[in-house]
Structure formats: C-alpha cells, structure tokens
Amino acid sequence: MPTFAEIEGALERLAIEVPSWAYGNSGTRFKVFAQPGVPRDPFEKVADAAEVNRHTGLAQSIALHIPWDEVDDFERLRKFAEGLGVRIGTINTNTFQDDDYKLGSLCHHDQGVRAKAIAHMRRCVDIMDATGSRDLKIWLPDGTNYPGQADLRDRQERLADSLAQVYARLGPHQRLVLEYKFFEPAFYATDVPDWGTAYVHCAALGDRAVVCLDTGHHAPGTNIEFIVTQLLRLGRLGAFDFNSRFYADDDLMVGAADPFQLFRIMYEVVRGGGLDEGSQICFMLDQCHNIEEKIPAQIRSVLNVQEMTARALLVDRSALAAAELEGDVLGASAVMMDAFYTDVRSDLAEWRSSRGLPSDPVAAYRCSGYADRIVVERVGGTQAGWGA
C-alpha cells in the first residue's frame, strides 16, 4: 500500500465546488425551516462559500443558479469573490419553475416555449462571459407522466436541436455540461434519464459537451462507479454532483448513506485519471441542508470527499492488478478493503496543518465567531431559499 506521503501530490489537485443554494433555506415539500444568518443575496452566499474554503482549502469555487443568483453586475460579483480568495464556477440553468415549462422546456412542442428556454441558457452564457466561468450546466425537468402524452422520439429531436442552438453560443473555452436524472418531476418518461442518453446528445454536439453525474440520480442498486469508468473511458465525464441518498434524490450530505460507495467511485476516478494533472472534471456538491447548519455541513461534506479520495489513492494498484491476473478474488477484495478501512483522519489533519489550515476545520469554524456575526449582521431583508 502507498504511504500517505506518496499520495499527497494527487491529493493536492482535489478541488470541490460548492453550490450557492446550499447556503439558503431549504426543506421538503412539507416545510422549509428557516435559520438565522442565512444569506440574503448572492454576495452573502459567496462570503459563506469563502468561509468554507478558508477552513478547508478545498472549495475554491462556488456554483451559481440562474435566476436565483441574478445580480445587476456580475463583474462586481466576480471581483467580490476573487477578493475573498474564491471564484465563480459553474453556471446552472433553471427551466423548471416557470409556468410555461409545465410540459417541458427544450423538448416542448411549442416553439415559443423552446425559444424562451434557449434564450435563458444563452443569457447564462452571457453571465459566464462576465464571471469567467467555464461550465454551463443543464438539468432538464422535461418528460411526461403518461403514455401517449407526447411523442417520445419527437421530443428527442427537439432536444437535440435546442441543445445545438445553446452549444453554438459557447465560447472556445466554455463547455456544455448535460446532467441526467432517472425520474422526477416526470414519472413516465424523463427526456434525459440516464448517462447513455446524455452521452448520445453530447457526442452529437461536439468535444465541448460533457456529461454530469449526480450521485443521487440513479435507480436503486445502480453501479455508479461503472458509469464513472465508462464516461472516463469515453472522455465525456465532465462533472460530478456529489450528495447522498437513502431512497432517491435525497440531496443529503455526501457519504452519509454509503461511504463505501463514495470510496468506490473515487477509486474509479483515480484509476481513470480524473485526478491527474490537467483533468477537466469539476467535482461539485449538490446538497440542500434542511435541518443541519449550512456552513458546517458544507465543511463536513468537502472533508468527506477528501477523506474517501485519500483512501482511494491508498489502494495498492500493483497488488490489485496481480490479484486480478491470478484470479485471486479474495485477495483482490482484500486490497480494496484494506484501503477503505485505513483511517486517514490524523494524516489529513497533519496535511492541513502543514499548509496553514486548521487541523479540525469544523471546530475552527465553531471558534471563529463567523456564525454569531452573520446572525447579527443579516437582520432584515429577505433570506435566500431554495428557488429564490
């Protein structure tokens, strides 16, 4: 097994984007629970994200969601972020809240509705130009609830045409990142339900169209690391949305339900070169903290990814390859389990301390006074929330 010192170089390259919406109020369809000190605008969301990075050194960028994070001057927001040591990352589109999109957006049978959705996505590229962002992420709620509600093939043709129009607006250093989801809010047929559909559309668009894998967007029992392997092999894995799920798209803290799955995923990332120098994969959290405190939950989440990445890097790949070639099933399994069960927490604490970071980021945040300060300062105005 490699030593911790031998994996530090790869570990240095791990960066985890945090989502602006994680810092606002969120909940279930039954109740949204408000918390004191929640941001009232995108600038305060950026400030909270910068606090996560200050304590972990892992979260150098923050993803925005449009129109939730609209501001009058995105250049000013970019400079504000840079002044706090972070940058604006992925720009996420939203075609799932307007009444016009009840029957779809890019796949809608009405050309006017499709044009509205395309215009929104082009507007998001304008924002990318102002913020220096590389990735336009598209997740579509498009789909149908009943057989016969719409022609499935026609919807795919409209989707391909709409995506091509959006793709044509990208600059030479920008990417279209297409996300898929097994179900919800459509329950009979979702227009981009799986990695294969997303891949087919991206391959047709061009080299700067890549797939986003959300760890909560699969049927129960799906081998997610197999999908990771395939997309890496095909050169089309562009982004991760990390969260955790017990039943469906729960959006819980990454690693909460199945840390071993997260370890297996990160091993395939390592095996496939996803942490190599020059890798273009964007690792991002996609979580809504409904009952836990927002900032500590984000800190804990990025640390969970870092810990499982470190364990994945500790897999003795030479011993594993030898066991595989010898048909040593139990020996190969033991190599994987030895790495998974290795406690790297003290090594990571020393790693952080050696880089001027707190050895215990959660405890450091608790002692920083930041939480008390934002409760006092953020009185009045309208708190941000999911969908706001």
Image (tube, rainbow, N blue to C red):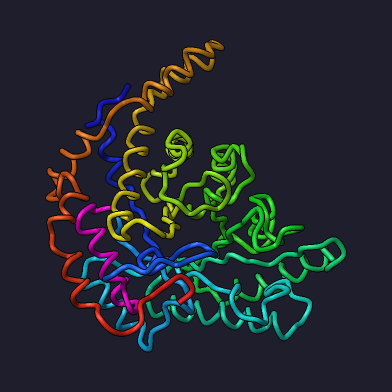
Which picture quadrant has residue 151? Answer: bottom right
Q: Main secondary structure of the magenta part?
A: helix
* Vertical side of 244 occupied by 68: above or below: below
Which picture quadrant has residue 185? Answer: bottom right
**Is 110 in front, or is 148?**
148
**Is 243 in front, or is 318?**
243
| Residue for point 54% across, 62% down | 177
| Residue for point 16% across, 44% down | 359
Compared across the picture, whether 331 is left or right of 295 comes to right
Q: Residue furthest bottom?
A: 72
Compared across the picture, whether 177 is left or right of 356 comes to right
* Vertical side of 176 occupied by 357: above or below: above
Q: Residue furthest front?
A: 30
* Vertical side of 73 occupied by 252: above or below: above
The quarter of the rendered structure image containing the N terminus is top left
Q: How many marks?
A: 0
**Is 6 in front, or is 121?**
121
Q: Which residues are magenta?
A: 37-58
**Residue 365 within the segment the image draws in magenta:** no
Instruction: Residue 234: give x, y in percent of width and height.
Output: 59, 46
Q: Residue furthest right?
A: 148
| Residue for point 41% across, 77% down | 69
| Residue for point 31% across, 79% down | 77
Instruction: Residue 363: give x, y in percent of width and height.
Output: 17, 49
**Residue 52 within the segment the image draws in magenta:** yes
The quarter of the rendered structure image containing the C terminus is bottom left
Instruction: Residue 269: give x, y in percent of width and height.
Output: 46, 40
Which picture quadrant has residue 202? Answer: bottom right
Compared across the picture, whether 205 is left or right of 74 comes to right
